[in-house]
Image: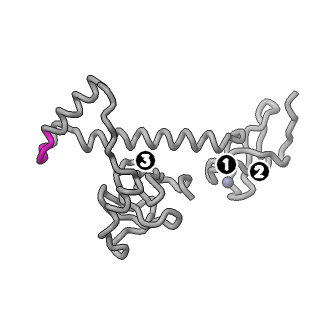
Amino acid sequence: MEKQYKVGDEIEFYCRACRLNLDGNVYGLKDEKVDMVMCRTCFKPMRYQPPVDMAARRDDKVKKLMRALERKKREDAGDPVVVRKGSRRIVTEQRQDEATPGPLAPTEEPSPQDRWRTLTADADARRAKVWRPADTYKPGDFLLHKKWGMGYIETVADEGLLVLFREGPVPLFRSEEGTK
Ligand SMILES: [Zn+2]
């Protein structure tokens, strides 16, 4: 049996404005169920949404962002319409890779940490852009992040950026909900 709420009762809910599970007050009922809630943090009335699993939600968002970034990376690297120095060769190789996975090549790739060290070795921190989700960035730019420090922008998509920091690659969301 569900709890019967009445207008004014305190209720935990997901606030779409604050983007958090928060306490609110029941603001309106419909068929004896909670329909509208007012957030006690931002004071906005809105349709009731039950609290969400924030960790799962974040995982989903990260996966979505990574997919968008992967897509963007492939577009940037292999769009056959774009004529670039050496692009023909790159495209051909990619097609082959996709068709025949083949045996795993011995990985001689540098670790993300090594790549970061190489890429940022000559970077001038004064020319790096401070991370602001709404700003415009392009791959190859350097970025300064409050938490992660200096980073090298690998991929830029509408949804966010993939940035290589000292600790490794980090997806950054355009919305403030991402990395804190
Ligand atoms: Zn709120």
Magenta range: 83-88
Q: Residue 158 appears at what percent x and percent y?
A: 38, 48
Tell me which numbered mark, 3 or 1, is placed earlier along the sequence.
Answer: 1
Tell me which numbered mark, 2 or 1, is placed earlier along the sequence.
Answer: 1
Distance in Å between CA atoms under marks 3 and 2: 30 Å
Question: Height in image: 124 above or below 18?
Answer: below
The quadrant of the rendering that contains the C terminus is bottom right
Distance in Å between CA atoms under marks 2 and 1: 9 Å
Tell me which numbered mark, 3 or 2, is placed earlier along the sequence.
Answer: 2
Q: Is mark 1 within 8 Å of ligand 1?
A: yes
Q: Which of 27 and 139 lies nearest the eye of the viewer?
A: 139
Distance in Å between CA atoms under marks 3 and 1: 21 Å
The secondary structure that dominates the magenta segment is loop
Q: Is mark 2 within 8 Å of ligand 1?
A: yes
Q: Secondary structure at mark 3?
A: loop
Question: Height in image: 172 above or below 54?
Answer: below
Q: Residue 131 appears at what percent x and percent y?
A: 44, 64
Q: Amino acid at mark 3?
A: Glu
List the residue tagged with mark 2.
24
How many neighbours does mark 1 have within 10 angstroms: few (below 14), some (14-19), or many (20 or more)? many
Labels 3 and 1 touching (C-beta < 8 A): no
Q: Residue 159 has which mark?
A: 3
Q: Which of 112 and 4 lies nearest the eye of the viewer?
A: 112
Q: Amino acid at mark 2?
A: Gly
